[in-house]
Image (cartoon, grey):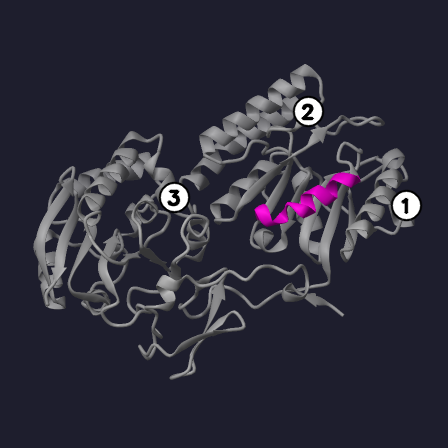
Amino acid sequence: MPITADMTIPEKRVAIDSLILERWACPRCKTSHLQERDRRVICESCEASFATYRGIPLFLEPNSVSNATDYVHEVSVIVLTLNEEKNISVLLQDLKQTLQKMNVSHEIIVVDGGSKDKTAEVARSCGAQVIHQKEQGYGQALNEGFSVSRGRYVLTMDADLSHPAGFVEHLWQARSKGEVIIASRYVPGAKFQAPAFRKILSRVLNVVFARVLSIPVKDMSSGFRLYRKEVLQGVKIQGKNFEALEEILIKVHTNGWRIGEVPFHYAPRVDGKSKARLIEFGICLLKTLKSMWALRSSIASADYDERAFNSIIPLQRYWQRSRHKAILGWAKHWKGIILDVGCGSSRIIQDLPNMVGLDVALYKLRYTRQKCSALVQASIFDLPFADKSFEGIICSQVIEHIPGGDRPFQELARVIKPGGMMVIGTPDYGRPYWPFIEGVYKRVHPNGYADEHITHYSLPSLTETLKRAGFEVLDHHYILGAELNVLARRVP
């Protein structure tokens, strides 16, 4: 019988944060008769049902998380081969013994890249499922292996015995440290036996990629990994060769998943020749760097806001830090619980205590969940909180991305207590500075937010809108005369 996600390895249920439980309300009927049952939030008044994800209530419909996937095995082991007749039998026998010792249901998939020897026949005789690659290349081998795997976890390894079967258990035991676990040659306790030139080139390429792309991973080119299957859904590998390994990690990190590393002693193969061509690999990797940098720097990246705070682009770094300084200059004096609407991965929610973060993008909340626990997925048009729930609100760079009108401001006014303070930020299109800076920003950072501004505000128009919603403007601050941040108070 197929096993479901809930039937495999027991996991500690992530509780919904008490700051949310004490203030939540159904976004449909606005009553507080919500109960968490079977990892869903049920409204006892209107019978609305919402999913939860790792302690994050998902109040958007349709839900952003699909139903639990049915998995046949706990782990699928994908072994990549090409002319490994001398090694594959030894590896598979050791692998089967290790998996039996671990007492996990499993399948072993051998993806053969067109071997001219008896690799495929030997693999079948050892009980492995053999897949013959349709297209050549390391990246394609991974794509095809991932597509047929039926395990909740997917482990990838080479067949040349440089990835010993016994180490699989170490990766498995470390699976709680991240959604991807890497057997790393460059973390403390690891060893890397290889010719000097290979060690130097590998080290340089890993450092360059990690630094340029701001990926917190020491060994991006290790193919000995354990993936949680759900992180691979929607990840289409474009790299043809070994650069696919870096591509996967970048896309996984961009989607907000955690990446962990465990120290690994790498020893080179004993029999056969390596399939890696270091110079060719390095050239392919550098070509990939440009496209991956564009992805890392785009708004599609879960840590976009946090990374912009330390951006290598001077204008972007200055802008983020100026906004951070202005908002914290006001909000650090507030008392009580603060709601951050459109929190993303902003440093603000990390630097202020007693905050509840709200965003529409689950992948950003998934990243921020690593640092903050009080998070919800919801819309500013239907805030899932009871009336007068918060002493303060921060709503930075949100209102220009949504259709105009009074509804969002009325919702903000509803959930804040009388006399509560709010900071709301948006570009000021009533002045000439923002259109000029926006044009420069598009050239310097074409994957940024600039093209997504659909509603334009000025200080007078924003002041009037806030007044209609029951706020009075107390102060305002500009960044380069272009971005407007307003301090307002809810009129008692």
Question: Callout 1, which amino acid?
Answer: Glu
**Disc nearest the viewer among 3 and 2:** 2
Q: Give the range drawn in magenta.
A: 165-178
Q: Which of marks 2 and 1 is nearer the N terminus?
A: 1
Question: Callout 3, which amino acid?
Answer: Tyr
Horizontal relation, residue 30 to residue 77: left or right: left
Residue 185, above or below 38: above
- Residue 221, given in percent of the width and then of the height, sits at 62, 33
Work out whether residue 379 or residue 36 is closer to the camera in this orientation and state it.
36
* Label 1 neighbour load within 10 Å: few <14, some 14-19, many 20+: few
- Name the residue carrying label 1: 121
Q: Earlier in the sequence, mark 1 or mark 3?
A: 1
Q: In which quarter of the image is residue 113?
A: top right
* Label 2 neighbour load within 10 Å: few <14, some 14-19, many 20+: some
Give the distance between the C-alpha atoms of the residues marked 1 and 3, in whole angstroms.
Answer: 48 Å
Residue 255, above or below 84: below
Horizontal relation, residue 461 to residue 144: left or right: left
Work out whether residue 481 or residue 351 is closer to the camera in this orientation and state it.
351
Q: Are marks 2 and 1 in contact (CB under 8 Å)?
A: no
- Name the residue carrying label 2: 192
Residue 111, above or below 150: above
- Name the residue carrying label 3: 304
**Which element is circle 3 on?**
helix
Question: Callout 2, which amino acid?
Answer: Phe
Is residue 156 rendered magenta in the image? no
